[in-house]
Image: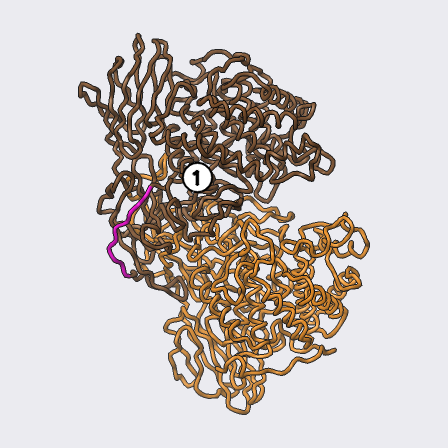
Chain colours: A orange, B brown
Amino acid sequence: MTSIDSTVHAPHATPASVPGPALPVQPRAGTLRPLDLHAVSLHPEGYWGTWQRLNTERMIEHCRYWMERVGWIGNLEAAAAGTLPQARRGREFTDSDVYKLIEAMSWEHGRTGDPDLDAQIRELIAIVGRAQEPDGYINTRFGRPGQAPRYSDLEWGHELYCYGHLLQAAVARCRTSGEDELLAIATRVADHVCDTFGPDGIDSVCGHPEIEVALAEFARLTGQRRYLDQAALFVERRGHGRLAEIEFGREYYQDDIPVRDATVLRGHAVRALYLAAAAVDVAVETDDADLLAAIELQWENTVARRTYLTGGMGSHHQDESFGTDFELPGERAYCETCAGVGSVMLSWRLLLATGRARYADLIERTLHNVIATSPGRDGRSFFYANTLHQRTPGSPVDPAKQSRRAASSQRSAWYEVSCCPTNVARTFATLGCYLATTTDDAVQVHLYTAGSIRADLAAGPVELEVGTDYPYDGAVRIRVVTAPEGDWRLSLRVPAWAEGATLTDDAGTRIAAAAGGYVTLPRALGAGEGVTLELPTEPRFSYPDPRIDDVRGAVAIEAGPLVYCAESFDLGSDESIDDLLVDTSVPARRKGRDGVVVHGRRESPIEHAWPYGPTAAPAPRTDQDIRLVPYSEWGERASGTMRVWIRRADAPAAG
Amino acid sequence: MTSIDSTVHAPHATPASVPGPALPVQPRAGTLRPLDLHAVSLHPEGYWGTWQRLNTERMIEHCRYWMERVGWIGNLEAAAAGTLPQARRGREFTDSDVYKLIEAMSWEHGRTGDPDLDAQIRELIAIVGRAQEPDGYINTRFGRPGQAPRYSDLEWGHELYCYGHLLQAAVARCRTSGEDELLAIATRVADHVCDTFGPDGIDSVCGHPEIEVALAEFARLTGQRRYLDQAALFVERRGHGRLAEIEFGREYYQDDIPVRDATVLRGHAVRALYLAAAAVDVAVETDDADLLAAIELQWENTVARRTYLTGGMGSHHQDESFGTDFELPGERAYCETCAGVGSVMLSWRLLLATGRARYADLIERTLHNVIATSPGRDGRSFFYANTLHQRTPGSPVDPAKQSRRAASSQRSAWYEVSCCPTNVARTFATLGCYLATTTDDAVQVHLYTAGSIRADLAAGPVELEVGTDYPYDGAVRIRVVTAPEGDWRLSLRVPAWAEGATLTDDAGTRIAAAAGGYVTLPRALGAGEGVTLELPTEPRFSYPDPRIDDVRGAVAIEAGPLVYCAESFDLGSDESIDDLLVDTSVPARRKGRDGVVVHGRRESPIEHAWPYGPTAAPAPRTDQDIRLVPYSEWGERASGTMRVWIRRADAPAAG
């Protein structure tokens, strides 16, 4: 693998009037090159193709419908009509969700070419354009008579955060449809930000990082160094206490420690992850190896000590923040869906920069167990938080109503703070981009799902067909449809859990594929040839670090990239799931396509007037087979209780 | 024991111009009668006497100093000066803390007669009086030009909550010094509340219960049925969704289920406990056996499933609320100090009503392990929350500054929300009241500490001298100084943990004292006679209900009423305490007056890049003696880490 500064991609192009490479992250340099939307097709019946289709057919429209209904699009119309602040509805950051919707629609339109979607996008862009003020400022919550002044509340106001999502929408639109009105709007915004917050401007940052990662990509889109410099300035300014001390401390918005001095992610998880993603962009664009190394270290420590089995990040409800090391209770695990999106954003950038398989491992884990958990299979409901243990069925959810964030075993149609649905939608719309990358002479496949991958290598174009029922089956068949004329290699990721994986070519030659890296067939494959990667996806037991208190004496069941869970539904009741124990001496076994069964016990708890006592007497237990389902599907069949970590039958009694 | 309606005390007296019975709760009926402040003296060197002396010498003055400094007393002065809202400082409920200070000072003055304190009280009362409006309304945050209108935010405004504390202050002042200006102020407030929120008034309740319990006691003080009726009306109104639906749900302020229909406490812990205390008062005053039974059931279920080993209540930081059943993580246990005060308020009322020892057991546990934990031994610093597990030393606390509520291993001088210090101060000022009660022919001693108890029984006056080093030693010597002429009995509480307790008289006759009730010598004791209660206070291991996830595989050490904890200070480092394991096969032993040592291991954790794995390999362990200190003393010696529940060495590896 080459180092970050030895592989230099094409220089920035000025915005084209025809679609350029259609992809969310286009670094100037790095170990791996991303592929654009058009290079990858997901089979509509494959695992990720099914999700992308649901996004196309339901989720995006669901988001648009709700944002009209609750008045968030209306806020921008009201800005143009001069009826603010009276007509304003929703929280301070609602503008951002309209922009995230435009971004999701733009990627989607880029992939499908759907003219109706294009018309909807144009309409939304026109609404946004009319809401912009002559100097580029745009926000429905600040700056008018009767509203707080512009930038008077950088801690909580989210003005720059909203701009960030507007810029990302413009990147998506421009890279899929070429220059249009949205690029002009975004350019005015970006220039306004540089004018206002530049070296001689307001010496502060936004309470919620997002403008940084957006300005960096906008610089990549436009080739304007000014935007990159502003992103870098925001990154460097943070961590010096420019924002106010608040109840949650300045670590809440990462203003406690300079980005390059921190050793672990902390504070509000989404903020921390968006900021770290931006820091990688800045590091890559400015050849700042120290900054990149700082973020890699933060990632390592965060993954080793502050990440849930699902890939979820963020332990606290109160401030939506990371906990301290090993503070990872399954109970009330917060694991905001948007933190999952932020984690994928960060790991993807680190993967491109370094080529290390660990980043792709976490992307896969997070996509399967956080991002695919949030939306219901109806495409019209979402989890905001993704707990690993639901003790009570929670309050029933009314699908016609906005919900508060509180934990429930049911997904909600919409939230007062509804950042997650649009974040999922924009991720699913670009899902193909995360499947594979290239170097000069090789293709690396990171995620496995049925579909096709096309790439241009130095040796010529290559086209691959992927056939698999992964994640339910570990066999991944990759066939070369078109082979480059020159020498090339195919590298396939072998997840860290995949001990015993093998790669077999058509001739039956089998090589061992070491877990936790990439396996590369040591020769060029020709057209019509293929290989089969066999990943061991039999169910397995996973044990936690003993420093994680809440899951001590418990075990989780995984199979392939999927985390499994037990639901009260399968016990024939909507009551407690907390009386189950797993017998780890009996192997877990598959049951049906995606189900798993483990042998265990069910305990009849002894009820006491006081739940602490001098004896550790065991409660009566009976044998019980426990059916498990993929965690991402929990709460789909009924309102009930759930747990990922289940007590071990061999743990001592009463604890 | 007699039933609630068979024992009827003296009818209400109109306010006297000389001090009447000086005690916070004076029920019309009930199984046990409380003793007043003057009937009990705590020895100044005894356990509780030491605390009361610290309150006298430091805490009350500390509270007064801070409330002047941060402008909370100034808010009331500003109200009179007409400089509100501009001059107002602090949160919406700051008035209440001034009233709680007056209450604490009044009880204190009642006990000590200190003329300086009396002068301070008079000065504060005059300030309050000048802030009152002609119709009785008094609040510094609402009702003026530039402020929200009166009662426009019952959910969060705390106007009635503040009145509640004013009424309780007036009860304290009147019962210790007779009628004065404060009684007149409070009467105007109470009448204003009845006029405004009566059957034909605003049909709602306060977001934070407190007015209910205060009105009930004010009715007892004044003999005015109107105030009791209003308290009852508030209790009955709640639970029908009169308050707005909020993010935390209506259970946050107990407006989800009618008080008499609920089966367990839920939502914001302090609110739930204050409301339940009021419901007991209403039940007792109106002979409502159903309402009393409902609260008893709620108490039973809350104690069996929603209470920490320390007696602490409230699991969530986000909304300061109870968790669901068995959701009791030691990590980040919230256990607000004020919830401890509320729990004592509730249990005391239930003890008086029913005479059941369980209520006194919880009072003792909570006093020792929540209320005595909050203040530092300097009398000038306080914990707001009382976690059972501190993973990191937390941010250093500046003793000259107000703190936010976030967890730290150091107590803070003052908080932006500083309800706890004054709550502790008013509790300590009345501590003697909780020691003992009477029935017609018996004295019941509930708490053991060096001091004296005087009571008037039907048979005549009795005076007892209590000598003990409890809780560090289990021997409690009670000597009769004055015996009644007629037949009488002495009953002593035997805590539920005290298996094997004995009661011995001067003749050496020893009777077994069954744990979890009262032991009564079956004869009258004469003057000069005595008994010794021997409670087994050797250290003991306590095991949790296996449904409490966070403490599974762990053990706690208790001795007498004290919960113990391990601190990093005793490991010679301020780092992790999470690598300790206790060997429960070796008995814990006392070391010194209040220390305990257990045998165990120290583990050298295996560091992994991902904290979940396929093996449960044990980490290397070395033998280690672990010194423990009373939990109430944690954080006194240094800033460090701490845990109450420690892993068991016999739990399976890696979990």
Chain letter of disc 1? B
Of residues B289 and B13, the one nearer the viewer is: B13
If the image is split into quadrants, where does the C terminus of chain B sit? bottom left
Is B610 on the left-hand or right-hand side of B160? left
Secondary-structure class at tag 1: loop
Q: Which residues are magenta?
A: B620-629
User: How many numbered discs?
Assistant: 1
Q: Is residue A407 visible?
A: yes
Q: Is A476 placed above or below A251 here?
A: below
If the image is split into quadrants, where does the N terminus of chain B sit? top left
Query: Residue most toward the right?
Result: A81
Q: Residue at x 67, y 61 (%)?
A: A160
Q: Quadrant of residue B333?
A: top left
> Is B627 included in the stretch rendered in magenta?
yes
> Is B362 included in the stretch rendered in magenta?
no
Q: Residue at x 58, y 67 (%)?
A: A236
Query: Residue most toward the front?
Result: B116
Q: Magenta region, mostly helix, strand or loop?
A: strand
Q: Amino acid at mark 1?
A: Ser
Q: Quadrant of residue A599?
A: bottom left
Is B556 on the left-hand or right-hand side of A307? left
Instruction: Report x, y in % for residue A103.
Output: 67, 66
Q: Is B593 placed above or below A409 here?
A: above
Instruction: Report x, y in % for residue A608.
Output: 35, 36
Q: Is A398 placed above or below A450 here?
A: above
Q: Quadrant of residue A255?
A: bottom right
Instruction: Report x, y in % for residue B593.
Output: 27, 38
Query: Residue most toward the left?
Result: B508
Mark 1 sits on what residue? B374
Q: Is residue B306 visible?
A: no
Of residues A81 and B218, the one nearer the viewer is: B218
